[in-house]
Amino acid sequence: MPHIALPEGLPGIRGAMAFRPEIAGPMSELAEVLLHGPHSLLPGDRELIATYVSSLNECYYCQTSHGAIAAVHLDGNEDLVRSVKEDFHHAEISEKLKALIVIAAKVQRGGKNLTEEDVALARRQGATDLEIHDVVLIAAAFCMYNRYVDGLATTQPRDEALYRERGKQVASEGYIIAGKKYLPFMSVNR
């Protein structure tokens, strides 16, 4: 049960954003730029990073929803998403993505945990400064998103089919357009 009165029928971050609509736009825009917009890293790879950080933070809603979005971008490969969460070192992903996940994991524990050696390894695997920058920001942002979702004890359904459906929508439309689908609910009285 949520710690505060959140709108019914909007799980996770969606309910929290509907409660405080003035933050929904900026938070959705950040997710759009980091995960969905044009980039040298594929959307599926960026979603895998968000999923991994969310799994480290034990945020069920975020790891499941972003895992579903990642799977859509990865041609429905839910097994790959699961293997990245369980042991990305042995998952069938590029060495570059593995090095970027190391960066994300270090930032998840605390920004000062990231070392020059971690960054040098990512560069040797072909990562650009933009990619390194954005992976650090994805990790930092998902620590915030995860704590927002769990800190309010938002509703987090366990029916993975719901996450798959939402994953298809976000993968197709992005975070801003998909987010506007619940705008009518955003005039909630507090």
Image: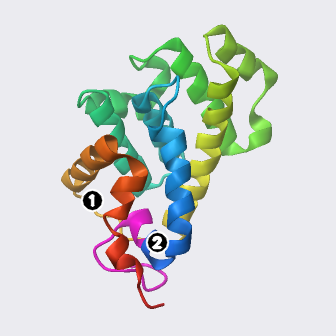
- For image coordinates 48% across by 84% down, the residue present is 4
For the N terminus, the quadrant is bottom left
The image shows residue 112, relative to residue 142, as above or below, that is above
**At which x and y percent is residue 69?**
33, 41
Numbered disc in front, either 2 or 1: 2
Task: Residue type at mark 1: give it.
Answer: Arg
Q: Which residues are magenta?
A: 1-15
Q: Tell me the element at label 1.
A: loop
Q: Which mark is residue 16?
A: 2
Task: Please tell me whether mark 2 sits on a helix, a strand or a loop.
Answer: helix
Residue at 30% across, 34% down: 71
Name the residue at 78% across, 27% down. 115
Among the 4 quarters of the image, the one containing residue 120: top right
Q: Is residue 68 visible?
A: no
Location of residue 27 in the rendering, given as x and y in whole percent from the top left corner: 54, 58
Extreme residue in the top direction? 124
